[in-house]
Image (tube, rainbow, N blue to C red):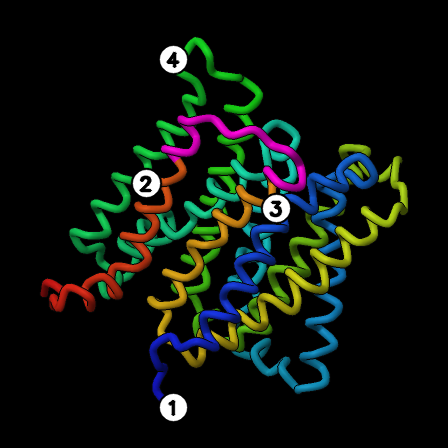
Amino acid sequence: MSARRGADAFCFQVMLLLCATWGLQQVAIKLAAADVAPVLQAALRSGLAALLVGLLMTWRGGWEGLRQGTLRAGLLAGALFGLEFLLIALSLGYTTAGHVAVFLYTSPVFSALGLHLLLPSERLRPFQWLGIGVCFTGIAVAFIGGTSFAQVDARTLLGDGLAVGAGLAWGLTTVVVRTTKLSEAPPSLTLFYQLAVGFVLLLGIALALGQTGHVALTPVAVGSVLFQGVVVSFASYLAWFWLLRRYLASNLAVFSFMTPLFGVTLGVLILDEPLTLNFVLGALLVLAGIGLVSGEAWLRGLLGRKPAQ
């Protein structure tokens, strides 16, 4: 395979579309929550996307990875994926889609910490440690939500905490993929594990919580599930893997910071969600911290510095 290249205009255009799509995901879930419960939405979208990925793999002959001993790691990655979307679904019942979009994207910080502990080649550098400190400072500022702790909304605080938990689950999924045999498996197989296991777990939880009793097949509900399953979980994830095979991951990571910005903006425009000054300041710090962690190689290149040995 040819060497990965730096970002170009085509890459930026695709990433712009992907980030807008990912930013709209939480808004779509919340918009349809009255018709289909969020946990059930997460189960249905995972099941639909797993079916599409499975058909694609059958067509392309992509099941060979099952013989590489990836099952245990795949089940673990799938369980973490299911946990991530369970926490997202629950968090949207307490906080805004914009808050979830920002806190979910703390995942690179958690994955960087996990990889630092497990892989010598992934040791954190000074820029990244600074980014982690900035990110968690931003979380603390955003969590306050008012001018004093007495003004904190307990429901919003709970929802924000669940969203950070979803970011942690996503980060741990990345650690599992990078440190197990999944790192050598086809990306489509890794995605199938996550979607299929997530579907089973989330559907079981939706049944246990009684969320299947009320389902209204409104245009908004059907559109939300189809958007999440076909556009987000199937098409956009495959497009992301395609980009990762052709462009430098550090460049893509920097572009992906646009996703929370789209999430917050779309939440305000579509759901009429409020914004507090503390959240805006905290979100900017979170994004800056994520930028330092994920875009360290890119920043180092801009400054012309070599990594410390």
Query: How far apart in space, not on screen, are marks 1 and 4 (Cα)?
Result: 54 Å
Query: How far apart in space, not on screen, are marks 1 and 3 (Cα)?
Result: 35 Å
Q: Using the rendered view, name the quadrant where residue 271 is placed.
A: top right
Residue, x 47% and y 40% (percent of image)?
103
The answer to whether residue 26 is left or right of residue 157 is right
In the picture, which quadrant includes the N terminus? bottom left
Secondary element type, mark 1:
loop
Q: Amino acid at mark 2?
A: Cys
Where residue 130 appears, x then y in whole percent?
21, 45
Which residue is disc 2 drawn over?
135
Q: Does residue 286 lie above or below 194 as drawn?
A: above
Is residue 275 inside the magenta stretch?
yes
Image disc number at residue 2: 1
Where residue 201 appears, x then y in whole percent?
69, 48
Which residue is disc 4 drawn over?
148
Q: Amino acid at mark 3?
A: Phe
- Residue closer to the observer: 258 or 215: 258
Secondary element type, mark 4:
loop
Q: First in sequence: mark 2 or mark 3?
A: 3
Residue, x 76% and y 44% (percent of image)?
40
- Residue closer to the observer: 16 or 47: 16
Find the magenta span and give its range.
268-282
Q: Amino acid at mark 4?
A: Ser
Q: Amino acid at mark 1?
A: Ser
Question: Comparing marks 4 and 3, which lies closer to the viewer?
Answer: 4
Secondary element type, mark 2:
helix
Q: Using the rendered view, name the quadrant where residue 55 is placed.
A: bottom right
Q: First in sequence: mark 1 or mark 4?
A: 1
